[in-house]
Each structure stands twice: as structure tokens, then as C-alpha cells.
Amino acid sequence: MKIVKSISAVGVILVAVSITLAHAEKVPAIFTGNGLEVAYNEHGLWNDTTIGQGLEYNGIPISYPGIPWQQVSIAYNNIVQGQGNFSFYDWNLQVPVVGHTGGSGFGDIGSTTVWNAGDLRIMKEESWLEEGKVMKIDVTVTNECCEDVKDFIFMHAVDSDQDQTFNGAYSTLNGALPMQSFAFSAGLYSGLTTSYGVCDRNKQDVGHTRWDSSPFAPFSTVLSLADDTMHIRHHEPLINGW
């Protein structure tokens, strides 16, 4: 993740072992086709309950099997501002998720969502290449107040259940390599691995929890076979007011 004043970029890596990413059509809010697929809910998360889909790879569900779980949590000034799974009930959704091309200067498929969280305006852009295996998530944070914001935390998390389609299992082999700033959830039956990779080792950390939605949650980096959730978190000490 890179911060330039109020701009942050969260690096999210989605690795498919022994599978090549193919074409995905550009469809606003729902991206379908062979390869990487995302069905967004109305709040810009990877869980569309109306069709029962979320993040998928080559038609294999990643974030939706069992209890759909893809999380964004935000805090600043030591106060949790919002936590989302299915929807942000207490948030003012400023701009619903929309499809776009050339997102964040990284990929040729993507989406944009804008949220309000207290005094902050938060824009999330997701983008990926048609021929690649990596999704990049850029988060632009704007302080719309005259007062400075301290200790801003943005947490992004997902429950990887790629093996469920193959043998009904919800557990993945989970671990993290802190020195390499890399966390992974590997499916032992599907051959698919989802992972988070950071862009700024000084301000970001990765790991797993037992379904913890708090942006302050402690992360585990111990190798384990479990139905745990994978997380990436960015901490920005100061975002100046205007």
C-alpha cells in the first residue's frame, strides 16, 4: 500500500495454482466469464446475495460458499467507523459500485465504489488484467473536515472457501510470511490459493483471524488448517484536515 498524503493503495494478490486466468467480460457491478469473476452487492463488497455469488475463479466460488463473508472495516481516532459484510447499514453510500476500464492504471477490468465514513470520503477501486492473476485494490481517502484524522485503519478481509465445491470442505491451509508481507489461504483439493500481498511493509500487516471484523483484531501468522479468514490492514498515522 502506498500513501501520498490522503491516498492509499492496497495490494491484493489472487493466485490460481495451475490455472490460467482467461477473459472476463466488462459488466457493471457483476463481472462474469472464464477466469476471475466478481459479483458485487449494492455496497461494493464481493457478496451479491440476490444471485448467490461473490468472488469466483473459473466458476469456482471463493467468497460465497457457506456464510458469505468479505469484510471491510475502518477506524480512526481510535473509534471504529464502520464494519461491513453484506452491507454497511450505518454508512452513507455516496457512489454505488460501477464498472470501468483501465482501473487504477493497473488492469483493464475494474470497479469503483465511494463510501462516507464520518469525516472521510473513501473511494475503493479494484482492477485486474484479463490475462493476469492479480487484483489490485486502490483506496483513496479524503479528509473533508478541518480537523486532522489520526490513526486511520483500513482492513480488507475475505473467507476463502475454494475447496467447498470440490469436497464440501471449508478449511484452507492458512499462513503468512511476515518478512515477505504475504498471507495465503490454500485449497488442498481445488488447487487454488488466495493471498494478500502488501505494498508498504512499514504501514501494513497481514494474517488470519477466526472471523474477526474489528479493524484492531490481532492477526495470526501461524500455519494452520482451519476455516479462518484472511486479512490485510493499513495504518496511516495522520491524514491532515483542510
Image (cartoon, rainbow, N blue to C red):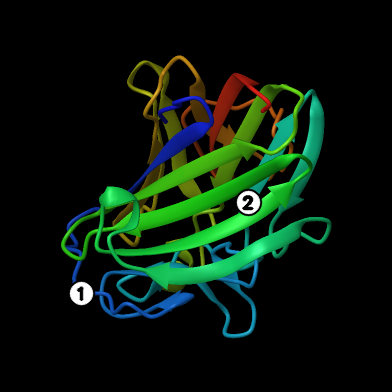
Which quarter of the picture shows residue 90?
Answer: bottom right
Which quarter of the picture shows residue 195?
Answer: top left
Circles 2, 1 touching at the beta carbon (< 8 Å): no
Q: Secondary structure at mark 2?
A: strand
Q: Nearer the viewer, residue 187 or 83?
A: 83
The residue lying at 63 percent from left, 48 percent from top is 72
Q: Is residue 5 above or below residue 75?
A: above
Q: Secondary structure at mark 1?
A: loop
Q: Residues within 10 Å of mark 1 (few under 14, many from 20)?
A: some
Q: Position of residue 236 (x, y in %)?
A: 58, 22
Q: Residues within 10 Å of mark 2 (few under 14, many from 20)?
A: many
Q: Position of residue 166 (x, y in %)?
A: 40, 70
Q: Is residue 160 above or below residue 5?
A: below
Check disc 1 and give the amino acid type.
Answer: His
The residue lying at 42 percent from left, 31 percent from top is 1
Q: CA distance from mark 2 to mark 1?
A: 26 Å
Check disc 2 and give the amino acid type.
Answer: Gln
Res 124 visible: yes
Res 64 visible: no
Q: Position of residue 190 (x, y in %)?
A: 33, 62
Q: How many marks?
A: 2
Earlier residue among tags 2 and 1: 1
Residue under label 1: 23
The residue lying at 33 percent from left, 57 percent from top is 103
Q: Nearer the viewer, residue 157 or 199?
A: 199
Q: Position of residue 91 (x, y in %)?
A: 78, 56
Residue under label 2: 71
